[in-house]
Image (spheres, grey):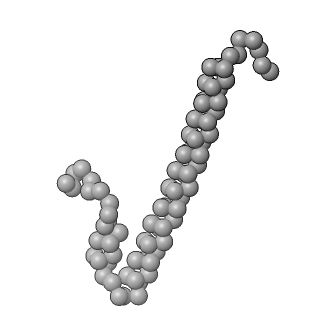
Amino acid sequence: MWTIAMADGDILKVVTLGIGGVVAVVWIIASSIRGAIVGRAKEASRREIAAYIAEGSMTPEQGERLMAAGEKPKKDEA
């Protein structure tokens, strides 16, 4: 419902806030999807490394190094 108090500046504010809200919701959804994809890929890699260790083509130490690759070192280890 439009009222006399709602001038052109007010409409612009409402549209801007609406677009900002849509952008925020899309950003949150995209971030959640990305997190799920990254987590799934990491778990698949861990299963593959475990399979290589189980078949004997890789030592447990090599597997441990591969699983730790790319992770930030913990504060107490640095």
Q: Residue at x 48, y 61 (%)?
A: 39
In this picture, residue 77 sits left or right of residue 50: left
- Residue 45 occupies which quadrant of the picture? bottom left
Q: Residue at x 48, y 67 (%)?
A: 41
Relative to the observer, which residue lies in front, 49 or 54? 49
The C terminus is located in which quarter? Answer: bottom left
Q: Residue at x 45, y 66 (%)?
A: 42
Relative to the observer, which residue lies in front, 53 or 6? 6
Pinpoint residue 40: horizontal percent, then vertical percent.
51, 65
Q: Residue furthest front?
A: 8
Relative to the observer, which residue lies in front, 29 or 76? 29
Pinpoint residue 74: horizontal percent, then vertical percent.
27, 53
In this picture, residue 15 sits left or right of residue 73: right
Q: Residue furthest left?
A: 78
Pinpoint residue 63: horizontal percent, then vertical percent.
33, 75
Q: Residue furthest right?
A: 1
- Residue 52 occupies which quadrant of the picture? bottom left
The mark tally for this picture is 0
The N terminus is located in which quarter? Answer: top right
Pinpoint residue 44: horizontal percent, then vertical percent.
48, 71
- Residue 70 occupies which quadrant of the picture? bottom left
Q: Is residue 39 above or below residue 66?
A: above
Q: Is residue 70 above or below residue 21?
A: below
Q: Residue furthest top?
A: 5
